[in-house]
Amino acid sequence: MRTGDDDGDGPERVSEPVLLAAGVADLVFDRVGGALRGARSLLGRSDLPELAADGREELRRRGQLALRRYVSVPECHMELLARRAADRTGRSDD
């Protein structure tokens, strides 16, 4: 099989997008194989429940940080009412 680097024109010539797709597929396959090997060794651990709990806690904390960073949190309802009451009380004293 010839690749896109060859100068010959023929039916066996492979286009660059096909080569790129094959390269990506090979990379994904390699990463998935590595992940499966890691999962296999992970299942043999005796501290798996603690490890899962630690991972869950870390994800929860990361989620809190992400929400604080990207979402504006509205003021608590009771605090809002207290401020309004304090404003009204302050204005009536003047």
Image (cartoon, helix red, strand yellow):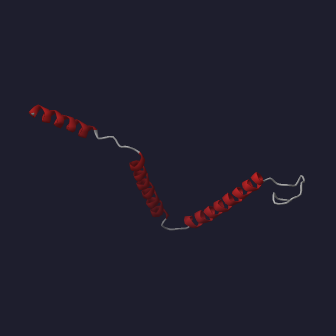
84 left or right of 3 in image = left
Quarter placement of the C terminus: top left
Of all residues shown, which one is farthest toward the front? 7
The quarter of the rendered structure image containing the N terminus is bottom right
Depicted 50 relative to depicted 92: above or below: below
The image quarter containing residue 84 is top left
Residue at 68% across, 59% down? 29
Q: Would residue 25 be found to the left or right of residue 57 on screen? A: right
Residue nearest the viewer, comparing 35 with 89: 89
Q: Tell me if 24 is positioned left or right of 45 in this view.
A: right
In the picture, residue 27 is in which quadrant? bottom right
Q: 75 or 55: which is nearer to us? A: 75
User: Percent from the top left, x then y, of residue 50?
Assistant: 45, 63
Quick one: 37 or 15, which is closer to the camera? 15
Residue 42 x, y percent position in the rendering: 55, 65
Q: Given the current orientation, which residue lies at the most extreme left position?
A: 93
Q: Residue at x 42, y 57 (%)?
A: 57
Q: Position of residue 38 (x, y in %)?
A: 59, 65
Q: Nearer the viewer, residue 43 or 57?
A: 57
